[in-house]
Amino acid sequence: VIVSLAKTGVEGSEIYNITGTDQWVMIMDEYGEGSYFPQMTKDFKNFKQFRRALYSVDHLKPRHGSVTAISDNAFYDCGSLINITIPDSVTNIKTGAFFECAGLTSIEIPDGITKIRPEAFSNCNNLTNIEIPSSVTKIEEKAFYNCPNLDIVIDNSEYSIMVETDAFKGCKSVSWKK
């Protein structure tokens, strides 16, 4: 079975039962993205993508190397998420990856991240400070929108990064090191 909502394919599916339920999860390695494409079913005919934040799949390793992207909406509305250290292998934080993670207070972004996609951290009301490394070349629309307690420090100059509309709107402060 090969199914994909992304432009890249998936392969190497594994199917797991959610203990004590009639639900099954099929997790496929998105080989072009370095992440997973999880889907849920009860009848093995109708699969739908499920919210990763509700289940623990992070201990699984893709067969084609390290995770290079945090998928669209990967941790959407995950209120129990408090702090995150993003692995050094990640270069792209995709659309809505941490959208509305109300409990999130801190996150470490490694040098090597190049893009922060739209609404990646929007509405993270308890996020207090973040340092964006010099490797970031693009911060897309509303990436940190409506994060009222957030102090952002960017290890670069305003002229070295493409910052799209409302990327920092509603944040406490933004400062540039260079």
Image (spheres, rainbow, N blue to C red):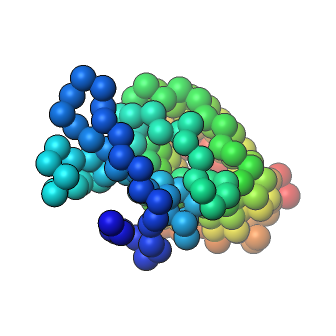
Residue 115, image x, y percentages: 62, 64
Q: Is 158 situated above or below 99? A: below
Q: Is 29 situated above or below 152? A: below
**Identity of the residue furthest to the bottom in this view:** 7
Q: Nearer the viewer, residue 57 or 156?
A: 57
Name the quarter where the C terminus is drawn.
bottom right
Instruction: Residue at 39%, 42% (x, y): give it.
Output: 52
Q: Is 116 situated above or below 122? A: below
Residue 80, image x, y percentages: 43, 25
Left or right, 97 with reference to 33: left
Is there any visible trace of residue 177 in the rendered image? yes
Left or right, 44 with reference to 58: left
Residue 176, image x, y percentages: 76, 53
Quadrant hosting residue 89:
bottom right
Instruction: Residue at 69%, 64% (x, y): give it.
Output: 114
Quadrant hosting residue 9:
bottom left
Q: Nearer the viewer, residue 169 or 117?
A: 117
Quadrant hosting residue 18:
top left
Instruction: Residue at 75%, 71% (x, y): give it.
Output: 159
Instruction: Residue at 48%, 29% (x, y): give it.
Output: 81
Left or right, 60 with reference to 122: right
Residue 92, image x, y percentages: 61, 61
Query: Total marks drawn?
Result: 0
Name the quarter where the N terminus is drawn.
bottom left
**Identity of the residue furthest to the right in this view:** 178
Left or right, 103 with reference to 23: right
Q: Is 123 situated above or below 141? A: above
Q: Nearer the viewer, residue 78 or 168?
A: 78
Is there any visible trace of residue 116 in the rendered image? no
